[in-house]
Every structure is written in structure tokens, then in C-alpha cells.
Amino acid sequence: MDTEPSDEVIVVGGGIAGLTTAVMLAESGRRVEVWARESAGRTTSAVAGGLWWPYRIEPEPLVGAWALESLAVYEALAARPRETGVRLLDGVHRGVRLDELGEWAGRVPGLREVAGGLAARLPVIDMPVHLGWLRERLAKAGGAVREREVTDLAAVPAPVVVNCTGLGARSLVPDPAVRPVRGQLVVVANPGVGTWYTSADHSSATSTYFIPQPGGLLLGGTAEEDDWSLEPDPDTAAAIVARCAAVRPEIAGARVLGHRVGLRPARDAVRLERETLPDGRVIVHNYGHGGAGVTVAWGCAREAAALTTPAA
């Protein structure tokens, strides 16, 4: 860049956290570029299941507020599903009770106890469509996305840098507290399933869920700590289909359309804070969202954007 005006921000990372934060900043009048190592379609966000729900993310009191703020945004975006990729769908979280959740759960519209779990009508986000829509919204606000790899945050030529690098923060910051939690999905031709379903044990490396998306029914899943493999495992895929078919038998014969693997950027607590460099420039960190980057995206983006201002 030739100039470095005081209102200029470079957001490093082109997944859901980076794009949402960039949109928030650009629409507030800041000059924003997103520097992404890879296209949005190759990010962890692109392979996410896309169901709004706080999953494998801490600390819960802050997460609840971020998630509720994001929920309100998604509910509004669901009025334009083809454009935004956001729809509201009914479903059940099996094995969950309201009294096991934080205060935030009491503020989720329609969330109620049913036999064996909780039922609700929640946002389901078609991630490839939604990421594309975010990039278009950023462009309309005057922002841009560049494919550029960053190896040193302090060397990024802007007065304010926002670090939304997810798992990349492990080596880039460096922050060894960020670690991968591997998730594998199977995409099948939807045999007529119109509702989502989850059954997750946070102490287990496996879970059972299915989420209807326009491109097929997403079946999951796994939560394999410290596993860096991006290659789908055939045995794991077969076990995923079997678990889902035990809930909805028609899934057993569904045609497999593809396999997805993503590495959730887990951390004991989301890092959302401002760091001032020796030369006075600012880095705002917004990473470590685990399995709920989509769920908290807008709440975290608002807080990260606020931290970029001199008064922060």
C-alpha cells in the first residue's frame, strides 16, 4: 500500500471471523483490507456445519452474549436465504437440558425442553454462500480481499491490524494455546430430512448430527483433539453414516456426495483483546473460537471493531 491513513485497518484471515470483522469496520467508515492466505472456500469456516449453537467454546458468560448478538443478526438475514445463505430450521439437541446451559439459553426464542432434549428453530448457515455474501457486502462498503500470506503480524503495513487467523495464530503469534480439534463430515444426497439433529458428548471424540443444507445433508461428526489430518478417513465416514442412520434410517441408503474435514481452532478461552506494539501501532486479536466461530461471529466482530479505535 502507498499510504497508511489513521483509519486504515488490515484484517488478517479470510474466514468467518475475519470477514465479519472487516464488514463491521468497513461499514463504520474505516478503510479495510482482508489479507487471506487462501480463498474463503478453502478456510475452516467453509466446511463448517453452519448450525448456530455455542459448541466447544469458552468462556461461557462472554460466549453467551456474543452468540445472542449474532443470533439476532442471523434471524434478520434469514429473510433473504438465497442471498445470505441463512435459513431458520427446526431441530433437536438430544441429551441437553436447559438447566445445564448458561443464562443465555433463556433468551433464545422458542428454545424449549422436549422428551430427551431441547427443541428450537435456529439459524442454519450455508457457509460457502454466506462467505461469498460477506465478501460482496465488504466490497460494497469499500473493502477488499487480497490473497496474501502473513508471516509476521508486526510487519503488516497498517496502523491497526486485526488478527483473525484462527488456528494459524498458533505459529503466527505464536500462541501454543491454540490447538486443532478435527471435525470430519459426510455429505449425502438428502433423502427427505428437513430438520437438524445433534447429540454431542463434549468428553467424546465422536458425535452424531445431521444438518440439511441446499447442497445436501451434512452428517457428522468428530471432535479429535490435536489431530492435524485433513484427509477424510473412510472408517470414520462409515461410522458417521451409521450413527446418523440409527436416528433416521433413510440416511443409510443415501448417496454420498463428498467428504469434508476441518480443524477447529480450539483454545481454553477466546482471545479477544488489544495489543499495542512498541512503535504505537495496534494489533487486535480475535481468534480461538473453537467449534462456534459462526455462532459468535457478529458479537466478536463488534467487540473487535471497538478495540481498533484510539479510545479503546
Image (spheres, rainbow, N blue to C red):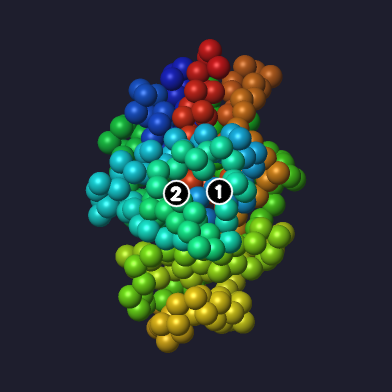
Quarter where residue 74 is shown: top left
Q: Which residue is pictured at 46% across the width and 38% down the height? A: 107
- Which is more N-terminal, label 1 or label 2? 1
SS at badge 1: helix
Q: Position of residue 176 (x, y in %)?
A: 75, 45
Query: Relative to 233, is 253 above or below?
Result: below
**Which image quadrant: the C terminus?**
top right
Q: Position of residue 306 (x, y in %)?
A: 49, 23
Query: Relative to 91, is 303 above or below?
Result: above
Quarter where residue 146 is shown: top left
Q: Is residue 236 visible?
A: yes
Q: Is residue 215 left or right of residue 287?
A: left
Mark 2 crowdedness (10 Å alpha carbons): few <14, some 14-19, many ≥20? some
Residue bearing the label numbered 1: 98
> Gap between marks 2 and 1, in whole Å?
9 Å
**Do callouts 2 and 1 mark residues in contact (Cβ within 8 Å)?**
yes
Q: Is residue 172 visible?
A: no
Residue bearing the label numbered 2: 111
Q: Amino acid at mark 2?
A: Leu
Residue at the limit of the structure toward the top, as seen here: 311
Between residues 152 and 73, which one lies in front from this camera angle?
73
Q: Which residue is pictured at 41% across the width and 76% down the height? A: 188
Q: Position of residue 41 (x, y in %)?
A: 43, 57
Query: Relative to 132, is 151 above or below?
Result: above
**Which image quadrant: the N terminus?**
top left
Q: Amino acid at mark 1?
A: Leu
Q: Position of residue 191 (x, y in %)?
A: 35, 78
Q: Which residue is pictured at 51% across the width and 36% down the height? A: 66
SS at badge 2: loop
Q: Is residue 71 left or right of residue 223?
A: left
Q: Which residue is pictured at 64% across the width and 25% down the height? A: 275
